Amino acid sequence: MTMPSTSTVGAAPDLVSDEVAGPSHVQPTSRWASAGRELHRLAAPKENLTRLVVFALLMGAWELTGRWLIDQKWISSPPSVGERLWDTLRDGTMIDNATYTLQSAAYGLAIGTVLGLVGGVIVGNAPRLAKRALDPFILAAWSTPRIALAPFFVVWFGIGLTSKVALVVTVVGFIVYFNVRQGVEEANVDLVDAMRSMRATRWQMIRYLTVPGLVTWLLAAIRIGVGMAVVSAVVGEISGSTKGLGNYMSRSLHLFDITGAVTAMIVMALVSVILYVFVSALERRVSGRRNATGFDAAATTKL
Amino acid sequence: MLTLHRRTGAAKDAGGGPGAPSAGAAIEVDDLSVMYSARGSGPAGSGTLAVAGMTFEVEPGESVVILGPSGCGKSTLLKVMAGLLEPSSGSVAVGNGAERIGFVFQSDALMPWRTAVQNVELAVLLRGGAPREARDSARELMDELGLADACDRYPAELSGGMRKRVSLARALAYQPSVLFMDEPFGPLDAQTRIKVGNFFLRLIDRFRQTVVFVTHDIDEAITLADRIIVMSARPGRVAATIPVGLARPRDYYETRFDDGFTELQRAVWEVIS
């Protein structure tokens, strides 16, 4: 009458199970491979074909609009922009400008990350009363349109690199600050308890839990911050500069050189995409293939 | 080679040497009370009494299940027993006070930035193992527990059942003399629960760990326990102690058809209602 039971056999207990999540063809990979996978994902042949079609459709629509609906002198055209891109890349103009913009973005990103990290760790660990007292001011500062600050920075720091870096810092710093603070405040209680149950020392807690936990949040913040850094650098350049993609764009517009302005915009987009892919790959490599926990609300920055 | 502390009669036989654990209970809980005080207010006075004057013992190698309704303070009790929370009054003694403990959480509490095997390695490192030993013994343990395929995956890439087993593997890698389990199978679906439950039953049959297991599931309690401590609703007290004499090895699913299971269900139910 008794049902044959699969697991009450007295011999060596069968602890082996077949249960593995995810597609079985995925091989265990190193952390480096995951970075490669990120790039590979963007270069997957099937998607690329679709992307090519979308690109061709967009270009076609642009070209036809210029022929039939709006005079090309207002919106330029794909061939003119392509030609300008080729020329300016060859004579180095666009490379110089892009480098300048990248420089402001990168310096601002670095300084903003450090300031945001320090601020986030300090406020995250601060007593409740101090947080409540500070929060309205921090939110007020965060809500201030940064574009309004750009002219101030030009007056204070001149039309050189410093004023652009300062603008980038005010944007990136807050993004990192909010992320790090959240990371500090939401330190997983069970993870802390797990470490305590294994009698981790204070140093082991910092080394194995606090720092790696923060790195994850920090990288998510930087991923968002990268795009914002380029945008802020360009805004700074439009407000007052002699170089940079933003400067090239506004200068072209003053001369009714729509082709030049559009070319600069396309280069900006390219620079942002390249930086984003780079940081995403870095993030995946460092934080593992876990789901990214980004403070994505910060992506909708007011500028 | 898998070395785990076996809390059997061996401890008693070896007794007498300096620092040897006392021959008595693995865990002694004496008149334990836990008060949650409102945040910011003083330590004494106003607050919620979570656990009120509980006294019981757990024998070496015994599986004790603490059963009670949600919010009766059973998780709080377990955390105090494991030294993660301070009692308001009374005391808890685990072995000679220097025993290593393993704690398995309702959440898996795995570090998302470490692969499965790296999570297990951490337990070896924390008990003082060298990095090389950690690498070797973590992989060996994972292998032995049928988790070889999961080694290099991150927790986010594993199913709930796999994560739970990795989290058990980590607890075992720490070589604890007592395992504390806080509703570990609660979040799993019925099928996975039976799988992981059997996995766990095989482990305790094999290593004879001292186990303190918290659950609100009567069937689960009977299946796993040598003895069930039924807690009353908040504030938690010992409402009854029910010995479970069912034969081992048990099966997480099949055992419910064994003779005597229904009587135990009835006995537990009578105490609860």
Image (cartoon, helix red, strand yellow):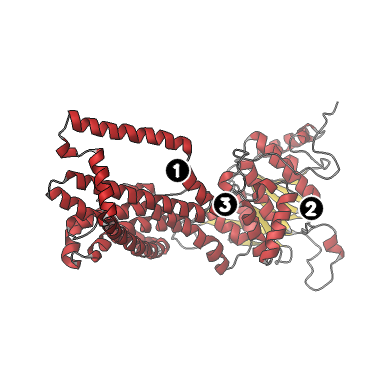
Distance from disc 3 to disc 2, alpha carbons, whole Å, reads 33 Å
The residue carrying mark 2 is: B207
The chain identifier of the residue carrying mark 3 reads: B
Q: Looking at the picture, how far across and down is residue B60, in whole percent?
A: 78, 56
Is B181 situated left or right of A273 in this image?
right
3D distance between C-alphas at marks 3 and 1? 54 Å
User: In the rendered view, does B48 fall on the left or right side of A236?
Assistant: right
Which residue is painted at 17% across and 44% down in the image? A258
Residue type, mark 3 in image: Ala
Of badges 1 and 2, the one in the foreground is: 1
**Quadrant position of residue A141:** bottom left
Observer-nearest of A4 and B31:
A4
The residue labelled by disc 1 is: A42
Q: Residues within 10 Å of mark 2 (few under 14, many from 20)?
A: some
Q: Residue beneath label 3, please?
A: B50
Disc 1, SS: helix
- In the structure shown, which secondary structural element does the residue marked by tag 2 occupy? helix
What is the spatial separation of the Cα atoms under label 1 and label 2, in whole angstroms?
49 Å
Disc number placed over residue B6 in the picture, else none? none
Q: Amino acid at mark 1?
A: Leu
Query: Residue A213's spot in the image, x, y percent?
Result: 50, 58
